[in-house]
Amino acid sequence: MEVPQLDLFLNIIPLEICVINLEREIIYYNKVMAESSVKDELQNKKIDEIMTIESLDDQNLFFELIKKRKAKTEECRLFGQKRFVNSEYNEKKREIYLVFIPAKFDSKYQKKDLLTGLHTREVFFDRATQLIYGCERQNQKMAVLFLDLDDFKPVNDTYGHEAGDIVLKVISKRMENSLRKTDLIARFGGDEFILALSELKEPIHASLGAKRILKLIEKPIDIGDREVRISASIGISIFPDDGKNINELLKKADSAMYKSKTNNSGYSFFNLQKLLD
């Protein structure tokens, strides 16, 4: 029997919840999970693209155990953030229900990404919101950058995850060292990073920061017995022109990043013409 209140109930639970089919495609997700993703659309996305079970060498095993009702709570990463996932299999509907529980830390949340030492996106959201308030009071502009590494997967596939970890650490440190004290950087998850450049006199000045970051990333990286080169794509949104809060700005920057990747342009503004008018 359908329960009309079920959708409302699932959307007020402060946990990420989703339902996947046996092809591991997301067929339902609640509001909390949508907000955590920042991306506009999760429908029909493969759960493997946003979740990894780090305690298992083969993630397929986890889903096989779920169908045999033998899966227990597993530690995972959802959108790059540490979680514990609980599961339930509905054999009649051939659906798997996943509930993600925040990992317990001594503080309110993990403040530093375990691999790179950068802020986590939870901290970024809090501090970027504070920067927005400051820019609003001072009538200043702020740029939000969404950065995705273009050539990272081949490094992982060819040289292994240890080499990939070195690349992420080196690039993170280069970017962090290049920023002003008034700027902000965090690892969004995987090979994606988010930045906030505050107190801009002109929004177009964000392009100078983007160019500087791209040059830093493109320098050779020593992974032990060889050097590798990485490039990146950056999308830029501007407060308040493109959005009034960090969620809006990140979505617009993410959209601009895909435009940059498609055009192979290095970086793109969400709405450059609006800034030039």
Image: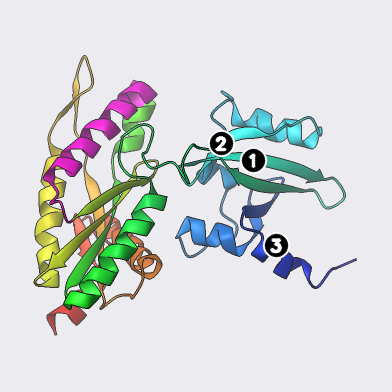
Q: What is the three-letter code of the residue carrying label 2?
A: Cys
Q: Which residue is mark 2?
A: 76
Residue 152 quadrant: top left
The numbered dot on residue 64 is none
SS of the residue under disc 1: strand
Residue numbers of the magenta segment? 158-182
SS of the residue under disc 3: helix
Q: Which residue is mark 3?
A: 10
Residue 13 quadrant: bottom right
Quarter of the image with the C terminus in it: bottom left
Q: Is residue 253 left or right of residue 34?
A: left
Q: Which residue is mark 1?
A: 85
Residue 51 drawn at (x, y percent): 54, 42
Earlier-in-chain disc, 2 versus 1: 2
Q: Are marks 2 and 1 in contact (CB under 8 Å)?
A: yes
Earlier-in-chain disc, 2 versus 3: 3
- Residue 160 shows in this picture: no
Residue 178 drawn at (x, y percent): 12, 45
Q: Dot 1, crowdedness within 10 Å: few (<14), some or many (≥20)?
A: many
